[in-house]
Image (cartoon, rainbow, N blue to C red):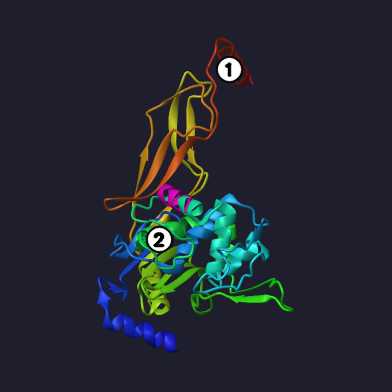
Amino acid sequence: MKRFAAVLFFFIAFLYNGYARADAAAAVVLEAQTGRVLYAVNETQTLPMASTTKIMTALVALENADLSDIVTTGDNAYGVPGTSIYLQKGEQLTLEQMLYGLMLASGNDAAVAIAEHVGGSVSGFCDMMNARARQIGCENTHFVTPHGLPAQQHYTTAYDLALIAREAMKNADFRRIVSTQHATIPWHGHDYDRVLTNKNRLLSAYPGALGIKTGYTRAAGRCLAFAAERDGMTLIGTVLACPDWFTQAAALLDQTFDRYEMYQAMAENETVAQLPVLDGVIDWVGVTLRQPLSGPVAKGTIPSVRLTLPESLQAGFGTQEAIGVAELIDGDATIATALLYPAQSVGERTFLTGLGQAVQDWLVLGE
């Protein structure tokens, strides 16, 4: 009831372009499959991001090490300020256990231990983080720590952080970890284990929530990367410097789910066209796609489809090379694309294949 009242007030007091205006320095909501931005405020403003930094820390670790790796707590990881899982010098945990400590309890000590294990040093690991950010398409992000404590030249934007979160959510191990509400990992020197509770309250309060990560420092304010799924559509959002982070995130999710839906124009393996084949053993070949052509559109909208294909194909082709592209278009925006492929291989017609076909045709006519 309290959550309903808070969201209702949010709607009434701050209506803006059909959305309740986010009480945040910057915010973004995008659709996970296509990356289409569905809501944005100050999305390219550079800001500190506190412990949402750890999304990239976890992603780089998962892509460059094994979950079963043994991570040893070094001198630099012991006693890092801020949130901690209280690692002792020399304490060893698997990388998977460290990642639970990183993403659920937001352990800054775990961040340094992971960085040194994967990158050889904190600075080396941050170089890996920055390189990965560039690969993802982040244009206004720079990392100098793996945990997000205040530091010069450590910043991102709401949009870049959403891109990082989207990329991370493609990793099954990352999704599993950040959607976990409680985990138990060993605690060396104690008669009991560490019991970790996820700081992201949306996991228990918002239907369909999938994660992702909270962050707070006095300099950055309250920062949150979040995700949820409803009716076949997954949304990923970020809010930076947002005092009422969970209520704001829930309101943005609700409003985006209310306004948008996934539209599927073509199904996986659907034959969408026929092309003539020159000098082939058959004269026509089907054209198909290997993934659905779908994307988010405002409810009630019917987008158009554009196929880009050659006029014909020269025989002697297989099915592995794309021959065109299908685009899903909403207004002036291309919101989704899918490569197009021949439905079957077609060999070249030779004298023998032509003779064989002529004989076959004669036999059929003679029946």
Residue 275 percent across, percent down from the top left: 43, 31
Q: Earlier in the sequence, mark 1 or mark 2?
A: 2
Residue drawn at (39%, 50%) of the image = 137
Image position of 191 (left or right of 334): right
Magenta stretch encompasses residue 134: yes
Q: Are marks 1 and 2 in contact (CB under 8 Å)?
A: no
Looking at the rendering, the stretch of residues picked out in magenta corresponds to 128-135
Residue 55 percent across, percent down from the top left: 49, 62
Can residue 232 be seen by looking at this rendering?
no
Name the image quarter holding the N terminus: bottom left
Q: Check disc 1 and give the amino acid type.
A: Gln
Q: Is residue 140 above or below residue 91?
A: above
Name the image quarter holding the C terminus: top right
The dominant secondary structure in magenta is helix
Residue drawn at (38%, 30%) of the image = 310
Tell which of 309 and 255 is nearer to you: 255
Residue 197 percent across, percent down from the top left: 58, 77
Q: Residues within 10 Å of mark 2 (few under 14, many from 20)?
A: many
Magenta stretch encompasses residue 102: no
What is the spatial separation of the Cα atoms under label 1 and label 2, in whole angstroms? 60 Å
Could you say whether the residue bearing mark 2 is in a helix, strand or loop? helix
Q: Check disc 2 and give the amino acid type.
A: Leu
* Residue holding disc 1: 357
Image position of 332 (left or right of 102): left
Image position of 9 (left or right of 343): left
* Residue holding disc 2: 161
Residue 260 percent across, percent down from the top left: 37, 65
Could you say whether the residue bearing mark 1 is in a helix, strand or loop? helix
